[in-house]
Amino acid sequence: MTEEKLKTLKGRKILITGGAGFIGSNLCEILLENNIETICLDNFSTGKRTNIEPFLDNDNFKLIEGDIRNLEDCHNACNGADFVLHQAALGSVPRSINDPITTNDVNVSGFLNMLVAARDANVKRFVYAASSSTYGDHEALPKVEDTIGKPLSPYAITKYVNELYADIFSSTYKLNTIGLRYFNVFGKRQDPNGAYAAVIPKFVQQFISHESPVINGDGSYSRDFTYIDNVVQMNMNALTTDNVNALNTVYNVAYGERTTLIELANLLKMYLSEFDDAIKNIEIKHRNNRIGDIPHSLASIDKAKQLLNYDPKYNISNGLKEAVNWYWKNLK
């Protein structure tokens, strides 16, 4: 079904900001597999050159090394682009708490630069990475798009501001936008290294190295973990939809199920022990909860199903199996 939709993009040019990152490189991959002209804008602050190395010899791929904080770079990248998939951002709640200024510069000023450049280039549609952190302290589950709480971190504030700016550019400048609130995305090419690595690749690397993963809290906190292929599908649906009622709004991007951190760690231990029997005996450790972390996250995906025909294929179990297989080959 996705391949049929992507045929409508033949002859169009797609700009992916943050295209060398985890999600961005997976988006580049599917577009190039379907022979669609793809531009990658990245400054490699968090993206990896190894993520896009397989694409560099592809005639449909163009790399622009630039920074979304520089308006000229944004204009240069948007020149001639028909659509934008804006993935460039500084993620991580702890990073934003440690350095709120840089997080704001990239996620707010950089986002505004991209909106301005897209508007000036007459881009047909601007699909951007929003975040489940926008729900903040709103406790009700599942999370429904129209009801949010108070942000709990500088990162959450920046992603909410993105939605506000996108809405203004839609109403004021008639730039069609779609925001995708990602819920704990995981999968191939997600970096396990660094102080702000996401929990799944970090735990995988620790298990492979026979180290004990450390859970913040008692392990009862839960998340709607979302495999990368579901996210790619949603981006492609947002890019290709001809439903005008689906534009200029935001959507949850998730599977719609909740997994506790202790359940997650035990699943990873089980799947990885199929490759290395010693992993099943590794102890899981605990420490205090992190500042800014919300206890539970679970998405309603009804809106995405109804308006964008979203049909996620990967739950936590089969998604983790895919991810573990990839990491075992690439981290060893």
Image (spheres, rainbow, N blue to C red):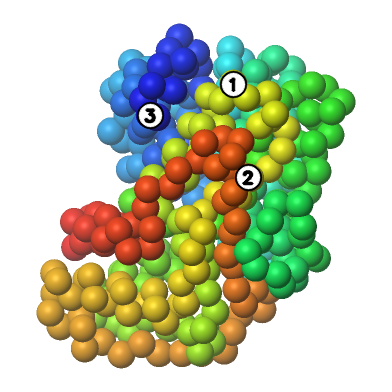
Q: Calculate the distance from the C-alpha at mark 1 to the C-alpha at mark 3.
A: 15 Å
What residue do we see at 58% from left, 12% from top?
Answer: 80
Describe the element under mark 1 as helix, strand or loop.
Answer: loop
Q: Calculate the distance from the C-alpha at mark 1 to the C-alpha at mark 2.
A: 16 Å
Q: What numbered label is drawn on residue 242?
A: 1
Q: What numbered label is drawn on residue 49?
A: none
Q: Can you give x and y, in whole percent of width and height, for residue 138 in the image?
A: 75, 68
Give the answer, above or below, for where 64 lies relative to 254.
Answer: above
Q: Can you give x and y, in whole percent of width and height, for residue 281 in the image?
A: 21, 88
Can the viewer see residue 71? no
Nearer to me, 93 or 296: 296
Q: Can you give x and y, in whole percent of width and height, for residue 59 in the image?
A: 33, 16
**Amino acid type, residue under disc 1 in the picture:** Asp
Give the answer, above or below, for where 3 lies relative to 274.
Answer: above
Along the polypeptide, which appears first: circle 1 or circle 3? 3
**Amino acid type, residue under disc 2 in the picture:** Lys
What residue do we see at 70% from left, 70% from top?
Answer: 140
Q: What numbered label is drawn on residue 1?
A: 3
**Amino acid type, residue under disc 3 in the picture:** Met
Along the polypeptide, which appears first: circle 3 or circle 2? 3
Which residue bears the numbered disc 2? 303
Describe the element under mark 3 as helix, strand or loop.
Answer: loop
Nearer to me, 115 or 232: 232
Give the answer, above or below, for where 291 lies relative to 52.
Answer: below
